[in-house]
Amino acid sequence: MSVEQTENRKTDRATAGVVDAVRVVTLGCRLNSFESEIIRDHARSGNSTVNKNRGRETVVINTCAVTAEAERQGRQVIRRLRRESPRARIVVTGCAAQLSPGTYTAMPEVDRVLGNTEKLDPARFLARDMEIGAPVAVSHITTVREMAPHLVSGFEGRSRAFLQVQQGCDRDCTFCIIPAVRGSSRSIPLGRIVAQARILAANGYQEFVLTGVDLASYGDDLARGVTLGSTVRRLLAQVPEISRLRLSSLDLARFDEDLLSLIAAEPRMMPHLHLSLQAGDDMILRRMKRRHSRDQALDLCRALRRLRPGIVFGADLIAGFPTETASMFENTLSFVEECGLTYLHVFPFSPRPGTAAARMPQLAKSTRKERAARLREAGKAALNCYLGSLVGSHVAVLVERPGWGHSETFAPVRLEGEAPKGRIVHARVTGVSAAADDGELVAKVTSVSGAETFPGEAAA
């Protein structure tokens, strides 16, 4: 799971002569990004605190708890925002708030703390509740079994749409805190997924990312025979406006036949998968309580390449897991090349409170950092090798900001020529940029396709 930070500001003019603002700062995963859009919709509704508290900005920080570093970054952001906006109302929510609400109520910069359930409740953003409601509202999310329907019209500043299909996780990986802060696995029925996709497509989005905590468990709580693959097949059939579809992180243990056949033959399925691998050593995988072995991961990647030649893989890897010996780490390092991984998300092991791995014998922090650095170097070399292989080829790029975007295989591309944001452009790769830290292609635009409307403009 990657950590990213975005800040977006939306004004609301429902009160004549007054422009108040709500700002949502998103830390963490794609699911947080989707939920931040729900928060924005609630906050700028007609009865929201934004409209009732003239002249006072509300800042909502949607936090991440995947690592201790993510939590530390969140606290830094809170303090910075208070310095920048001393009169603002600061509301902290998200996974870190769900995990440790007391940490944030103790911060003098914070006015209110909301849990992961509460942040999606529109009543929490009414002026009256914001003024007289409890300063802390964090319920036990592990008891939640249903999902309230939420539809969003777009993603502020983004060309790619996130489409939530699942929430929570029933797995018990020894290193992971996410089940404690996201609750049990819950699937969104197809009808609601289709309705959301149609809204986003009508507003100009061409590329979608199916998002959840544990996508592979999709359908376990629905009717018999419902799987991620069968749902994706029906989604693509019912929403032909989807030009490009990606899947967020996938567990290797649950690739159903429908999903495999779509990867093989459906051109709208992008030839890029991000796999939740975590390690390349069997003993460490067992101690993590992962559901696959090293050989199973290698076999799956080989099988997927046979089905879809040219497919590219990304992966999450943890460096310095408790009890990891030098030889175990070398197995993970060699696994990067053997598996043919191109995009690596590397995390030094971070003990999470209450997890089994936090009670295991720990490696020195310096060892964890050194191993993470070596994995990142291996990932950088693999990426640059892959990018070099694309020189002279033609790519289709979703333009995400002026002159820059990602290809079908998620290669970063710097574009020369007309490249309107939100559109898919076709370009010829002329080289690899030496200026980018992690490497990126340089490509000359040859043609532009897609709707004239930038994502989100149709809803304005």
Image (spheres, grey):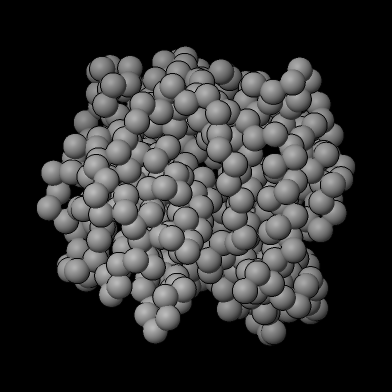
Please state if 69 lies on the left or on the right of 427 as rendered. left
- Which image quadrant is residue 178 in? top left
* Foreground residue among 391 and 304: 304
Residue 126 sits in which quadrant? Answer: bottom left
Q: Which of 307 and 203 is in front in this view?
A: 203
The residue sitting at 24% across, 66% down in the picture is 88
Within the image, what quadrant is residue 396 found in?
A: bottom right
The residue that appears at 56% across and 58% down in the rendered structure is 384
In this picture, is 397 found above or below 419? above
Q: Position of residue 134 (x, y in %)?
A: 24, 42
Q: Quadrant of the C terminus?
A: bottom right
Numbered disc total: 0
Residue ID at (79%, 43%): 235
**261 vs 19: above or below:** above
Q: Is residue 354 above or below residue 330?
A: above
Looking at the picture, tell me which residue is in the foreground, 24 or 77.
Answer: 24
Residue 16 visible: yes
Figure check: 451 above or below 243: below
| Place of residue 367 in the rendered image (x, y in percent of width and height, measured from the top left) | 26, 35
Query: Residue drawn at (59%, 55%), measured in percent from left and top?
Result: 152
Residue 102 is situated, as x and y percent measured from the top left of the image, at: 19, 37
The x and y percentages for residue 9 are 41, 70
Q: Is residue 248 visible?
A: no
